[in-house]
Amino acid sequence: MPPDALFDKCDMAKGRHIFHDMLNWVLPERCPCCGVIIAAGGSFCVSCWQKLEFLGPPWCRGCATPFEFDRGADAYCASCIANPPRHNGIRAAVKYDELSAQVALRLKYGGKIGLARVIAQQMLRHLPEEQAQLVITPVPLHWTRIWSRSFNQSALIGKQLSALSGIAFVPDILVRHKRTPSMRGLDHKRRRQAVARAFALHPKYKGTLKGRRIILIDDVLTTGATSDGCVAVLKRGGADWVQIFCWARALRDGGTQADAMISFDA
């Protein structure tokens, strides 16, 4: 490489570094929960990080509902014993509360699309070690919501998780051909009825899912009615294994599934 070209590359790298520093000074990074200014490259301020309730084992082998104490890797909760779920587990980064809700709301309704990467970074620790035949796909939105919002927040999260992990991202395995009404105030049964037959397998993927293992991305999981509808379609389409990944999961004090305090209609 000619010396002049080497110096040009060094100057360009230095220029980019200076520009990045200036940008951080003019538009500093902020905590996605509370909005306080944080150091460049950070995700949350120390205060919010300590308040977030990160989820992990010990939990139910079937649905990953947290246990108060370790019951063993093969233990199931009472709900899964009585009604085995269609899915192969739920992996939520944090418990849903007022703090974690702010992150989801700012991404979904505030247009802070950079938060998709912050969320994906917290999902990485839950990825399975065996990644053969594994693909990532989002819970789909109806076209009218895409038109009004201009993006699918679950697809943004899935794309970032794919970039961080190297797992293939396929955004259109599922389609939402029925717009569901607002879920606010509906109980679990009525939510399931509302999403019944709302999802379908995209025609181009029919016959291609046999043997596939799928990570289904959602932003917030409340009753699980929406994701359960998606799982049913994927399993009927031939998928061997479907696990749900989400940013936050609503849980009652006892650890069971609960409705979110704020409506998170897709």
Image: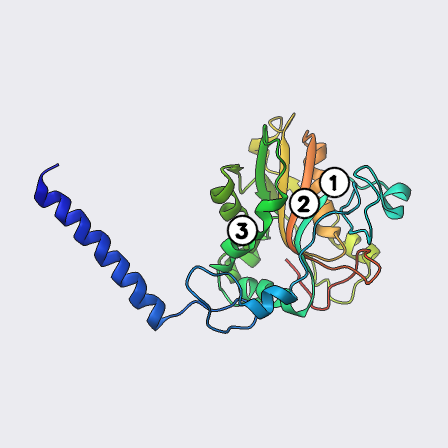
Q: In this view, does 158 lie to the left or right of 26?
A: right
Q: Who comes first in sequence, dot 2 or dot 1?
A: 1
Q: Distance between the residues labelled 3 and 2?
A: 16 Å
Q: How far apart are marks 1 and 3 (CA)?
A: 23 Å
Q: How far apart are marks 2 and 1 (CA)?
A: 7 Å
Crowd rating for badge 2 (residues with CA inside 10 Å; few <14, some 14–19, many 20+): many
Residue under pointer 3: 121
Look at the numbered disc 3 and give the secondary structure of its residue.
helix
Q: Which of 114 and 21 is in front in this view?
A: 21
Residue 133 at x, y percent in the picture: 59, 28
Can you say which quadrant of the picture contains the C terminus? bottom right
Say which amino acid is labelled 2. Ile
Residue 186 at x, y percent in the picture: 79, 63
Look at the numbered disc 2 and give the secondary structure of its residue.
strand
Residue under pointer 2: 244
Image point (77%, 39%), residue name? 86
Q: In this view, does 239 lie to the left or right of 151?
A: right
Residue under pointer 1: 87
Q: Is residue 193 left or right of residue 157?
A: right
Image point (71%, 41%), residue name? 231
Identify whether 202 is placed above or below 221. Answer: above
Are discs 2 and 1 less than 8 Å apart at CB?
yes
Residue 34 at x, y percent in the picture: 56, 72
